[in-house]
Image: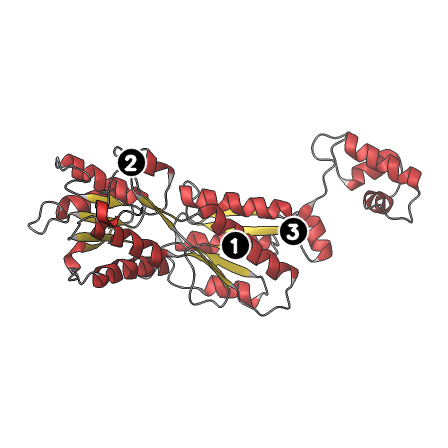
Amino acid sequence: MKKGRITIKDIAKNLNISASTVSRALNNNPDISPETRKLVQDYANEHKYKPNSLALSLRNNHSNIIGVIVPELANHFFSSVLSGMETIAEDHDYHVIVCQSSEEYTKEIRNVQTLIEARVCGMLISQSKTTIKYDHFKELIDNNIPVVFFDRICTGIDSGKVVVDDYSGTLHAVDYMIQTGCKHIAFFGAPPHLEISKNRKNGYLDALRKHHFAIDEDLIRIADNKQLGYERAMELLQTEKRPDAFMAMNDYTASGILLAAKTLKLRVPEDVSICGFSNSNISQDTDPMLTTVDQHPQKVGEEAMNLILEKVKDPESTEKKNKIVKTSLVIRETTRPLPDHLKQA
């Protein structure tokens, strides 16, 4: 027997029967005698035969493979989303192929082509922050490949979408900091063309309006990673209009803000309150631990996979379903406590 993965032709040669007989025996075809079926299946099990998924998809014009594109695999949010996706896929006997765009538009295009060539039956996509043209996504629609966007959605494509309630999550977090006495709250967001950045900024702005606070454009900056969070916070914290609170785009940005505050010998949360977004692992590794907004990424992954499987199993359906996953505020040590009169009994 040759080394490597055993094939149907190998089984046929070693049992001195035709490849078509082996194939039918492996699929329990009643036209094949019980004795031959047992002979073939026992041999296949003994030699650890595995069917070729790509060959099956070519023959049946359908695969049980869902393609997933994420901006960053090392990101806690996306790795948790993938965990939710794989749980649902496994329950339905589907497989997942994951590609990483690394926040690069050109690489995202290559990811799409790779998954098309792998003959996936559907795709789940969270677009990169540098994506501003959508021709590669339109190609999927034109080729009748079902698509569901999650988290970072593409508003220019008519498809199913699963999003976090970014607006409400940010509004509640900023509202909480205002109730604890904060009056000059900065917002550190992502590039403005991203829908999640727009929604989180709008939540921040509406929280200020709710309390009749003036909106200060100088307190609104683009900073969506630790280094930028540190640099922008160092700038603002040394101005006359020093913020007494920050609403960060994510926990990594929040950790950079925290580092800046500690570098300047400011007390957190007494002098500066900080709230992140995601409830990632880093939020509990900082000192003090970060208050943050939990996005419930496992739920995002489950909802996205359920939507794409619905579409794959019912390709004639024209319904474009959207799901919104609610957030929750996780209060830790980087924000002040509520005054006693505002605490719930």
Which mark is first along the chain, 2 or 1? 2
Residue 114 seen in this snapshot: no
Please state which of the two labelled residues, at mark 3 or mark 1, is closer to the viewer: 1
Residue 252 seen in this snapshot: yes
Per the image, the residue denoted by label 2 is 289
In the displayed structure, would residue 235 be above or below residue 116? above
- Tell me which amino acid carries mark 1: Ala
- Tell me which amino acid carries mark 2: Met
The x and y percentages for residue 117 are: 59, 54
Q: Are marks 1 and 2 in contact (CB under 8 Å)?
A: no
Per the image, the residue denoted by label 3 is 64
The x and y percentages for residue 97 are: 56, 47
Q: Which residue is rendered at x = 58% and y = 62% of the image?
A: 145
State the SS at label 2: loop
How many residues crowd mark 3 within 10 Å: few (<14), some (14–19), many (20+)? many
The numbered dot on residue 304 is 1
Separation of marks 1 and 2 at Cα, in angstroms: 30 Å
